[in-house]
Amino acid sequence: QVRLVESGGGSVQAGGSLRLSCTASGFTFDDSDMAWFRQAPGKEREAVARINSAGLAFYPESVKGRFTCSRDNARNTLTLQMNSLKPEDTAMYYCAAYRSGARYLGGFNAGTYDYWGQGTQVTVSS
């Protein structure tokens, strides 16, 4: 059974930092492309980072230079370091895993990912 469990969310002031973690089980983590998404109330889910099995990470312009995604394959853990947080970063953050061999709609497309965590809330106050 695939499980993705996020942790590390919380409330910070603008300019602060948070570190999110996602612990994975039930699939071959080190062979899987992974991603972080976020969703604010009334908005679509959007990607904030994706990382391939080799550890190469990609970011949308909205977070580039502020967020860093990494993975520890020995511990089946995905991490998102978020610095210089802004109020517009407030959202529920989700960890997602791509099922190898499944349809691929693009690394920043939520439809690519078959497995999702329950989310962790990040709130940034001004």
Image (cartoon, helix red, strand yellow):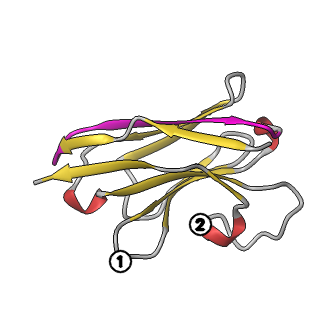
Label 2 neighbourhood size at 10 Å, few (<14), some (14-19), many (20+)? some
Question: Mark 1 highlights which residue?
Answer: 42
Label 1 neighbourhood size at 10 Å, few (<14), some (14-19), many (20+)? few
CA separation, marks 2 and 1?
19 Å
Range of residues picked out in magenta: 13-27
The answer to which quarter of the image holds residue 27 is top right
Which residue is pictured at 36% across the width and 40% down the height? 9
Which residue is pictured at 80% across the width and 42% down the height? 1
Task: Work out whether mark 2 precedes mark 1 in sequence or the reverse, and give the earlier one.
Answer: 1
On-image quarter of the C terminus: bottom left
Q: Nearer the viewer, residue 8 or 82?
A: 8
The answer to which quarter of the image holds residue 64 is bottom left
Left or right of 99, for residue 117:
left
Which residue is pictured at 59% across the width and 66% down the height? 108
Q: Tell me if residue 21 comes above or below residue 125 in the rendering.
A: above
Indicate the amino acid at tag 1: Gly
Indicate the amino acid at tag 2: Phe
Q: Tell me if residue 79 comes above or below residue 42 in the rendering.
A: above
What secondary structure do most residues of the magenta stretch adopt?
strand
The extreme left residue here reads 126
The extreme right residue here reads 101
- Residue 23 badge: none
- Looking at the rendered structure, the secondary structure element under dot 1 is loop
- Give the image location of residue 71, x and y in percent: 61, 34
- Give the image location of residue 11, x and y in percent: 23, 42
- Residue 108 badge: 2
- Give the image location of residue 98, x and y in percent: 74, 56
Mark 2 vs mark 1, foreground winner is 1
Q: How many marks?
A: 2
Q: Nearer the viewer, residue 43 or 18?
A: 43
Which residue is pictured at 69% across the width and 30% down the height? 76
